[in-house]
Image (spheres, rainbow, N blue to C red):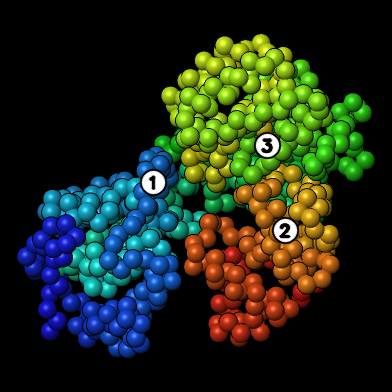
Amino acid sequence: MEPLESAHPLDGTRPSPPVSPLGPDRPFPHLNPVRARNLFLEGAAVPSSEVRAPILDSWQRSRFWGVDADRIEAPYNADFDPHSRLVTAARPVLDRLSDALQDTPTSLILTDSKGRVRERRTGDQALHGHLDDICLAPGFSYAEEYVGTNGIGTAAEDGRTAHVFGSEHFSERLQRVSCAAAPIRNPASGRVLGLIDLTSWQHTASPLMMALVREAAADIEERLLEIGSERERAAFRAFLTSRQRSRRALVTLTDGLLLADAAATELLGPDDHRRLRELAADPAGLHEQRLVLSDGRTVQVRGREVADGTSVGSPAAYLIELRLVAEQEAPAPRTATRMPPLPGIAGSSPAFRGVVQQLIRHCGQGRWTLVDGEAGTGKQELVRAVHRHVAPTAPYAVHDAADVRGGAAAWLGAVFQDLAEDRGTVVLRHLELLPAMVAGQLDGVLRSTAGRSGWVAALLTREGPTLPGAGGQRKAADHVDPVRARFGAEVTVPPLRHRTTDIPALVSNLIARQGGDATCTEAVLRALSRAPWPGNVRQLAGSLRYAEAHRTGSVIEESDLPPSVLSQAQHPLSAWESTERDLIVQALLGHGDDKAKAAKALGISRATIYRKIAAYGIRLGPHTG
């Protein structure tokens, strides 16, 4: 019989309680995970007779991610919505279970789909303190890539109930506890929304923990169905009511469903569904605007939120109307609105053209302008180009808030000196990085120099959109609001995913700017137009540098693009997933998109490769098949 593991005196944790009759410390007496783990960490072969296969697979992932076997380095992020659909559905179940487990050394934990702890209920003070010591507390992430094998992270990776007992944990710090976790799925879509976990001392663990978390997950899913049904009924009512009075194609989006009438079904493809969800998630996206569909046609889009009567804070759905724009329909009725050519700037989509026209007008009038947009949209390049177009001989000064770290007084003094010059353009970059105190001091500088005749532009980077139902988009840098109030005009540079018709011109412009002379195939341009581009123009430029480095001829082929461009996964990929995705893309490209040959080369089944292709959204051009 293997001896009980002792406490580790150097890790600062509390001693274990005595063995309890609630459960055995060796749930699998025929295995020897302690010896197996030692062999694994030494790089030796691990006999399958000494450790369970899911645990060995998890150890391999933990080693791949570089998890420290002796320390816990769980990242912390306390930002989450306490009224989310998951928390609302789970709270009554957590209340009931925590009451039942009140006198036991057991902790009840709710996490999101990525293993970030959202709620923890613990009745035992010793266990409560130990969980704090190992960072198994609200706000910390217990994803495998950070802390290694554990019930929460392993269940999230495998997509099924997982139980990890004592010495099966990859990290030494976790071996005094045992845990069981089950995924909580969206009843409509099957997508994992979160996990529920029971954690106890290793010596008090019981196989019954598996049954408890499965039952709790099922109860929460039933509650989600009740909440979802109410929300979906509200969405359906809005859809039916609008269809009776609207002559446009109609789409209703919820977090798990998409309702479309016959006209919308004919218009939209899978890529268009994704882009409509992004528009709905963007606060400005529901305003009337034009959208170029994946087949090249243009539609006029307008939408609104649909409220419901539940306690969930997010809208029940988004109702979107679409009108097909005829090819002969002029995008602008007056020639005065034509965009002048700006050196180094490419793009003529309606959204981008409108931004350029506004900036030229504000620059010419000397109207102080706040220019915001997501990171990588090219705000500074655009402002510089507008200045050169309007006032090419006037001074141009840029002050980056990132330089405040070198001394706020010197930075503010330089800003004041340039603003005091009653001519030229002054650009204040990365306004969101200003500390609150410096923002207040800058407000005073701006107030004292108000009325100068030159142009002042402040650049503010805001976060990208969240998915519908995720609590909306947080406002960037609230502490700079007094500074924002000094600017009479505000212009938002659209993200690249909202101006995909500009991509061919941008590609030519970026290749020339980088000193290249290659051209791109039509398949490459289609792939670039389909990609979501969370990093916007900056990410596109990086992808083209990658393609330039990997091309073998004068033409950039689809196989030269980064694998990330050829896939459209529905969630951010971990390091493990990114590596797997890249291997699959390379195998498909190397075998002409023949799935069977690619699967054989990778040593996986055809069913597996088809499942992975769907999961990662891998799409290769028709020429490869």
Query: Residue 115 vs residue 508: left or right?
Result: left
Residue drawn 48% across the image and 47% down it: 229
Q: Name the residue under label 2.
A: 544
Q: Where is residue 287 in the image (x, y as percent from the top left)?
A: 68, 32
Q: Where is residue 366 in the image (x, y as percent from the top left)?
A: 73, 18
At label 3, which amino acid type do we have?
Lys
Q: Which of 228 and 369 is in front in this view?
A: 369
Q: Quadrant of residue 84?
A: top left
At label 2, which amino acid type do we have?
Leu
Disc 3 to disc 2: CB gap under 8 Å: no
Residue drawn 76% across the image and 54% down it: 514
Disc 3 to disc 1: CB gap under 8 Å: no
Q: Nearer the viewer, residue 236 or 149?
A: 149
For disc 3, the neighbor class at 10 Å (few under 14, some 14 to 19, many from 20) is many
At label 1, which amino acid type do we have?
Asn
In three-dimensional space, the C-alpha distance between marks 3 and 2, rounded to whole angstroms, equals 20 Å
Query: Which mark is first along the chain, 1 or 3?
Result: 1
Q: Which mark is residue 9?
A: none
Q: Residue 379 carries which label?
A: 3
Q: Position of residue 193 (x, y in %)?
A: 44, 54
Query: Residue 441 vs residue 273: left or right?
Result: left
Q: Where is residue 271 in the image (x, y as percent from the top left)?
A: 69, 55
Residue drawn 58% across the image and 33% down it: 400
In three-dimensional space, the C-alpha distance between marks 1 and 2, rounded to whole angstroms, equals 33 Å
- Secondary element type, mark 1: loop
Query: Residue 133 vs residue 477: left or right?
Result: left
Disc 1 to disc 2: CB gap under 8 Å: no
Q: Mark 1 points at which residue?
A: 77
Q: Vertically, is 361 above or below 82?
A: above
In the displayed orientation, state which residue is furthest to the left. 18
